[in-house]
Amino acid sequence: MTISSNGLGAVSERVTIPARAPVDLHLHTLASDGAWTPSALIDHLANRGFRVAAVCDHDTQRSVGQAIELGKMRGVHVIPGVEVTCSWNDRQLHILCYGVRPDRTDADAAGFLALMRQIDLQLQDNAADAARRIEADGKPLPNLETVQAGRPLWPFHVLSAAIEMKHVPNLTKAAELVVALGGTFTADLPLGDVVAATHRAGGVCSIAHPGRADAVGIVSEADIDRIVAETGMDGLEAHYRSYSDQQTALYRRLAEERGMFVSVGSDSHAPHRPVNPRPWHAVWARDLLNRLGVDLLPLPDGEPDWIFGMDPEVAVPAPEPPPSPDPEPMETEADVAAKLGDA
């Protein structure tokens, strides 16, 4: 099924951009554990010539509507997205779901939006419980409302408030404190349910950063085959901020062999945290963009979509064969959850 780029069903008006136009299809805001405001993010993208972007906060779409409207004013075509924390095979996975707007009211989108409400409410319950446990342990959080800043209370705000009050030095220690006190700071949804609901809403799904060892862990070729067989997963994030050309080639090949699309993303959470949005070439995600209502002008005859050395910001591989950890100068709540294995 081809869906509209604004997540409203069948395509009525398609967007056409150059094949090498810069795009970034994995971006976070302060709606989850990032610090970009929608306005600052869109300004950054527009000022650098990005043509298409996708806002994919963890487990919420609160910034999506505003980002879409701001993008219209600045010439940035914003695709609705979300990075859903999913449970599968006794582990967590991060799944990028594209093409479903949070303001839809039709029956096809109802199941997906219900899942988004479910995980949001669970995270709010976990946050309130974590705050009570920390304060009952003699560690007051008088700054919590300020850190929350008018947003629904999530565990990230509680952990951040504990750090600001100097009860703990960082997110990892804050999360360890919550767990030691009998609480939890994460939530997830069954993978099959998320993919099925996304498909019913006309959206598509991609496995986020399958080659990133320090997040939720490597997603192996065998894992991918099982996930595709069990859920009908659509794509792989084959271009990612910490990948070498060798990793990109691997995941592009795995996607091509299985008829999956390729997605591209920086996973930027804030300016320089861990990186700014990356100007990926639109053609590297041609099939995904096409399914989302974005057409590409043709490349010159004989010009390859992607080859080794084409990305000037590609990571330099480590001398040892195993993939190196993602060089990330900040912690995010999602990474802490993966590190501690608190599902």
Image (cartoon, helix red, strand yellow):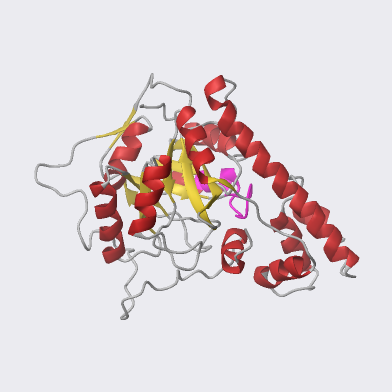
Which percent across, then down, holds residue 286? 28, 40
Main SS class of the magenta portion in the image: loop
Residue found at the very far bottom of the displayed protein: 319
Query: Is residue 73 visible to us here?
Result: no
Task: Name the image quarter holding the N terminus.
Answer: top left
Which percent across, then down, holds residue 109? 54, 26
- Residue sitting at 40 percent across and 27 percent down? 3
> Which region of the structure is painted magenta?
29-43
Q: Is residue 341 placed above or below 62 in the rendered structure?
A: below
- Residue sitting at 61 percent across and 50 percent down? 188
Q: Is residue 60 placed above or below 198 in the rendered structure?
A: below
- Let me know if residue 92 is in the magenta part: no
Which percent across, then down, holds residue 343? 62, 58
- Closer-to-camera residue (225/299): 225
Residue found at the very far left of the displayed protein: 302
- Closer-to-camera residue (146/262): 262
- Residue sitting at 44 percent across and 72 percent down? 325
Query: Is residue 36 visible to us here?
Result: yes
